[in-house]
Image (cartoon, helix red, strand yellow):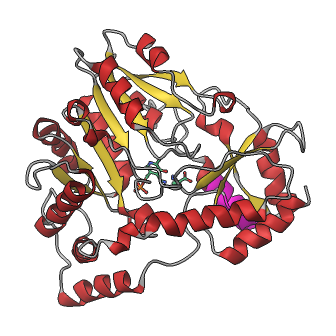
Amino acid sequence: MNIISKQPNTGTTIFTVMSKLAADYGALNLSQGFPSFNCSPKLTELVNFYLQKGMNQYAPMAGIQPLREIIAQKNQELYGVSYNPDTEVTVVSGATEALYAALTAIVHQGDEVILLEPNYDSYAPVITLNGGTPVYVTLTPENSYQIDWQIVKSKITERTKAIMLNTPHNPTGTVLSKEDLNQLAEIVRDTNIFLISDEVYEHIIFDGNEHWSLCRHPALRERTFICGSFGKTFHVTGWKVGYCLAPKLLTDEFRKVHQWLTFSVVTPIQYAFADFLKEPDNYLSIPDFYETKRNKFLDCIKSSRFTYTPAQGSFFQCVNYQKITEENDYDLAVRLTKEIGVATIPVSVFYHQKNDYKTLRFCFAKDDETLEKAGEKLCRL
Ligand code: PMP
Ligand code: GLN
């Protein structure tokens, strides 16, 4: 048999590679982004309750009504921006599906999509699978990964279909400001460019920073697909439940992809989230919880030779290792896993040309003991 591949990317991610390497070598796994601790017992009790109650058949295509309503209500309360739960909120199988469906809804053969790299690994393969071309704006640690919006503007052509944003940002831990939103609005004004905003770390934000969801700017709201995930917020990355908020016109197209991709999302878990979200403390407590984790990790590596700027959000901390070795970041990540017993992600994998800024990404969503043990090993380098 012969198959002509539609997808130039490999389909294997660094996250699974490093997690496997960590397991093979018995290393502490600070690579792939997932918590080492369990979710709230209240949440598992709720899932159990709805499983036993028999909520085990197909949910409606857009998601169960109570969940769509509480998502809309939460967005209204937090950001003062309303979405119609019937026509503008869709529950999907994780943010990965939201990103896929949003891109597939809008990208046609020959379209360009602007990516700010380093960027999460799923964006580019979906663009190319749809016949589009990623156009990159490169952010660097020398510049604290700040976005020069004039450079973004210079990449816009008549083929530009969308710009993808991610705040809080994986892997760099940076966040967009209100001023970033204003500048973005300025450059897309008078264009037909869509925005896809990956906000899965919306509640993992520190030091009093506010989450500037793109929906908070009225002109941006009208052209944006907001992609969210309960996996990050509630320590359940394996449940794969997320959602997309978008104006009706965009949601109509989004749902045409979702209908034929997964159609509907795991029912008992949707009911559990609908109840769990009724108690705001369940998500309002998350920034403090993760800020404490970040501080714990930074404390554990404070006598190491790594240099870093504390992450403003996400559950990742990037560090520069130039004072330790000249190795490239990929080789170092493999060696640290095999020889030192700590697995990390080399940040070059988030650049399309694998730029090596001697930077590693650590996931600090780990129990304190794991962070302490990792810190001890890292401080010996
Ligand atoms: N976007 C970013 C920036 C992520 O870090 C992740 C998850 N790891 C996702 C999207 C995917 O989220 P989900 O697991 O809900 O599909
Ligand atoms: N988002 C997670 C990370 O950045 C990984 C998810 C995945 O394995 N694809 O580590």
Image height check: is 74 above or below 259?
below
Determine the residue positioned at 50% across, 67% down. 288
Task: Locate residue 374 relative to residue 240 in the image: left or right.
Answer: right
Task: Locate residue 184 relative to residue 15 in the image: left or right.
Answer: left
From the top left corner, tell me how far across and down residue 100 is, in percent: 34, 42
Image height check: is 353 above or below 67?
above
- Asked whether 2 or 276 is in front, the reply is 276
- When asked about the image quadrant of residue 201, the answer is bottom left
**Magenta stretch, overall SS:** helix
From the top left corner, tell me how far across and down residue 308 is, in percent: 72, 46
Residue stretch rendered in magenta on the structure: 16-30
Residue 156 magenta-highlighted: no
Determine the residue positioned at 27% across, 22% down. 193
Residue 20 magenta-highlighted: yes
Determine the residue positioned at 44% across, 37% down. 123
- When asked about the image quadrant of residue 262, the answer is bottom left
Task: Locate residue 258 relative to residue 39 in the image: left or right.
Answer: left
Image height check: is 253 above or below 52?
above
- Asked whether 172 or 342 is in front, the reply is 172
Task: Locate residue 253 relative to residue 35 in the image: left or right.
Answer: left
